[in-house]
Structure formats: structure tokens, C-alpha cells
């Protein structure tokens, strides 16, 4: 049978600061590094990927909080702009506008 030793707070196994240091994320905390990480995240969708799908013009509009909540609830995340584009085309066609011209 193995002999069990009782741990005391002075033992190395109780060093919580060392354990936290091992588990801490290895991120560079400098301002330039934070900006670089943020830039990489925001550059995931860039002008080239949008142009490849034929989207070259910016369209921005205000909506009521109810519309925004409904879109967030019923339209999959990341597809809102495509969904709105299809809705606008459908509304124009219903109004008799020839959108293919």
C-alpha cells in the first residue's frame, strides 16, 4: 500500500500563484499587440471578399428596435445583409420594378 503524505499550505502543490500563472493565457498585453489582435478579427470580412460576391456599395439605414430584435431572433447571424438584400429585391419586384434591367 502506498504511503499517503499530508499536504500543507507550505508545499509546492499549494502554490496557487504558480498554478494561475500556468493557466493564464499567453497574450501580449501591449497596446500595439491588442490593436493587432483586434485588426485581425475585424479583417475577417474585407473588401476583397465582399467584391467577390458583387457587394461594392455601402448601404446603411436606421431601423426600429423591434425590427432589429426580430432580425436577431429569426435571421441567422452573419446572413443579415444577404437576407435584407433579398427582402429589398422582393419588395421592389412586388412594386412592379424590373430589378433585372
Image: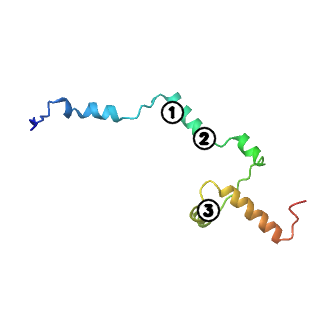
- Work out whether mark 1 precedes mark 2 in sequence or the reverse, and give the earlier one: 1
Q: Which of 29 and 26 is in front in this view?
A: 26
First along the sequence among labels 2 and 3: 2
- Quick one: SS at disc 1? helix
Q: Mark 3 points at which residue?
A: 75
Q: Percent position (x, y) of residue 64? A: 63, 64
Q: In this view, does 65 lie above or below 37?
A: below
Mark 2 vs mark 3: in front? 3
Q: Which comes sooner in the sequence, label 1 or label 3? A: 1
Disc 3 packing (10 Å; few <14; some 14–19; many ≥20): some
Q: Give the residue at x 74% y 59%.
A: 85
Q: Quadrant of residue 97?
A: bottom right
Foreground residue, 8 or 60?
Answer: 8
Q: Helix, strand, or loop for circle 2?
A: helix
Q: Residue at x 62, y 41 (%)?
A: 44
Q: Distance between the residues labelled 1 and 3?
A: 31 Å
Quadrant of res 80:
bottom right
Location of mark 2 (residue): 42
Whole-angstrom CA distance, mark 1 to mark 2, is 12 Å
Identify residue for label 1. Answer: 34
Alpha carbon of mark 2 to alpha carbon of mark 3: how far? Answer: 21 Å
**Residue in the image at 19% along x and 29% along y:** 12
For this orientation, the residue located farthest to the front is 1
The quadrant in which the N terminus is found is top left
Query: Which percent across, then down, holds residue 74?
Result: 59, 65
Looking at this view, name the residue that lies furthest to the right.
Answer: 101
Q: Where is residue 40 in the image (x, y as percent from the top left)?
A: 58, 36
Amino acid at each position: 500500500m502506498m504511503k499517503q503524505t499530508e499536504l500543507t499550505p507550505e508545499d509546492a502543490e499549494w502554490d496557487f500563484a504558480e498554478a494561475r500563472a500556468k493557466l493564464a493565457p499567453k497574450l501580449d498585453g501591449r497596446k500595439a499587440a491588442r490593436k493587432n489582435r483586434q485588426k485581425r478579427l475585424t479583417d475577417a470580412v474585407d473588401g476583397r471578399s465582399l467584391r467577390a460576391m458583387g457587394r461594392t456599395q455601402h448601404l446603411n439605414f436606421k431601423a426600429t428596435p423591434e425590427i432589429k430584435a426580430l432580425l436577431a431572433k429569426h435571421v441567422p447571424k452573419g446572413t443579415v445583409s444577404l437576407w435584407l438584400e433579398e427582402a429589398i429585391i422582393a419588395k421592389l419586384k412586388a412594386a412592379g420594378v424590373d430589378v433585372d434591367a
